[in-house]
Every structure is written in C-alpha cells, then in structure tokens.
Amino acid sequence: MYVKTTTEYQNNPVIVKVVEAFTSGVTVAAADFNTAKVDELKAGAIIGIDSNRLGHVVKTVKIVAGGSASAPRINSVNAFKVGDFISDGIVSLEISAITVGETYDTLTFTDGSLIVSATDTVLFQAAAADLTNQGKAATATVSDTDGDFLTITIPSAVGSEKFNNLSLTISQSATDDLTVAFENGVLAIGLAKTTATKNNLSVIQAAVRALATIDGFNFSTATATGVDWDGKQTGITLTTPTSAFTGGKDQTAGGTIAPKYSPIGISLNPVDLTIDNQSTGVMKSGTVNEDNMQYPIDSAMKAMLPRITFESES
C-alpha cells in the first residue's frame, strides 16, 4: 500500500502584489482588542503607528440596516470595544455599551448621536469624543395652566440656528378650532376654546408641520412634546404664553475628524492577539483585494494610502 502526500500552496487572498514593505514590520498592540471576541488579526488590516512606533490597527466598520443615529447597528465583524471612540468624520462618540448579535452589533453612546448613519457608511476609531460639529435643536416652551407645558422643537438638520430668538406664543382661539400661523417671526398657536382634545400634542405637531417652509424657516420636521398636556388645555389660563426659541445650532456638513492612528500600510500576515508583542509585516506599496479585507476601507482612508491599489470585483 502506498500513501502519496502532496503539498499545495495557496496565495493569500488579500495580498495581490507586494512592491515594497517596511523592512522590520511592526509590533501590534493586542491591548486594542477585546480578545474574547477578536483573537486574530488577519492579513489585510489597515495599520498605523503611535509616537512610540507601536503598531495599531486602524479600526473600521460598516453600518448595517435597522439601527438609528443614536443606536447604530454595525457589522458583527469588527474590532471595537467599550471605551473606544467611533466617528463618522463629523462627530466622535464614546462607546458605552455594545449589544452583540448574530449578524450585527448595536452600539450605545455615552453622549450624542452620529450625523451620518446611512447603511454602508464606514465608521472609524478616533482619538477622543468630539461633539463640536454636532448640531443642536432649537426649542421653545410655553405653559397653559401652571405646570402644564408645551415644547416645540426644531431639529438641527433643517437649520435650527436661524430659529433662535423667534417667538412661540399660545392663546385661546375665538372658535373651537386649533389655529397655527407663522408671521413676523412669531409661531402663534391658538388653542381650541372648548374641546381640549383638539389641542393634543399630535394635533399641534401636525398643524405646525403643515406650515412647511415659510420665509426660509422649515417647520416640516418640528415636534410637539409636553407635560400633563393632552386632553386638558383650552387656553383658559395662560401662565407663560410666550417664549423665545433658543439653543439652535446648525450641524457641520463636512468632516474634520481624523482616525486615531494615521494609516501607514496594510498588514501582510496574521497576528495571534492572545499573545502580547506579536509582529506583522506591513506593505507600504502594492495591491490588495479589497473584497477580502477583514475590515472595510472607504475612499477617504484609501487616499491616505496613495501607494496601495485596492482591487474589487463588486
């Protein structure tokens, strides 16, 4: 009986061509990872270095469908952990919790929300929390009877800053019909004089939104919230009938936040993250198959690696 043994060599599916690599490679910081979830860094990862020449993975991940700006769902294949700062390029948020699912993880933030949260957006690790560019809503609060409040909120996405110092007023309408109007910088709400349910928050919100855009002021996404309001208010008693809109700040359109570590190249070999001080070769010039990379890369990060060509069949 004869036993025939053959050996087959298979090229790395990520690395297509190496033109130039750093001669000594880099040591990868295993402390960057939750090794209970990620125990190996595969070839094809984006690598950066710190001021001590210690290598770090430039963490990236894609948003998947079904989440929100304040609780986005991300691809379950990711290296992020609680305490990391994650950015869409406009704001950077601290991750306070990660709910792990089968096909996606859901993030919770200490403060703030993403500005860009569309499916397939590539998020990256940043150095610190930064909400400088995040817009803020403009709000105004009035009161019918003592302790019963109505708040109108204008979200930042529609240009909330220009609403600052406009006025919100409530009064009792001359008829049993709710009226809403905007003129001369005043959003005037006339409360139906007899039927309190006609003044419920949902009815007020719909009426304000129906104003659409007047003189450049966009009311189409305004919200009406309140305390002890629905079914009780007809404008008989007006404790605080007038209030100015305040707090509005427009969100910044462009991105200014950079990755925590500037990319220097692409890892050439796997790294066992359960063992400290393991090293990897780093390609600084060549070609990679983007489809087979462990973590995603977007056009902005590719521009930071001008000597590397990214091929894709998709």
Image: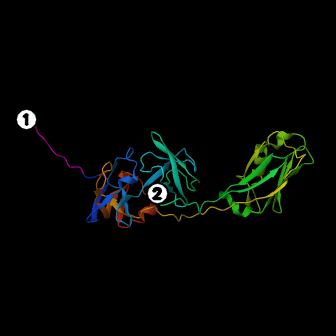
Q: Could you tell me the amino acid type at mark 1?
A: Tyr
Viewer-proximal residue, 145 or 210?
A: 145
What residue sits right under mark 2 in the picture? 125
Quarter-of-image position of residue 54: bottom left
What residue sits right under mark 1 in the picture? 2
* Residue 312 picture location, percent across and down: 38, 55
Q: Could you tell me the amino acid type at mark 2?
A: Gln
Boundaries of the magenta span: 2-10
Viewer-proximal residue, 49 or 52?
A: 52
Dominant SS of magenta comes to: loop
| Magenta segment includes 3 | yes
The N terminus sits in image quarter? top left
Mark 1 nearby-residue class (10 Å; few <14, some 14–19, many ≥20): few
Any mark on residue 19, and which? none
Disc 2 secondary structure class: strand
Mark 2 nearby-residue class (10 Å; few <14, some 14–19, many ≥20): many
Residue 80 relative to residue 185: left or right = left
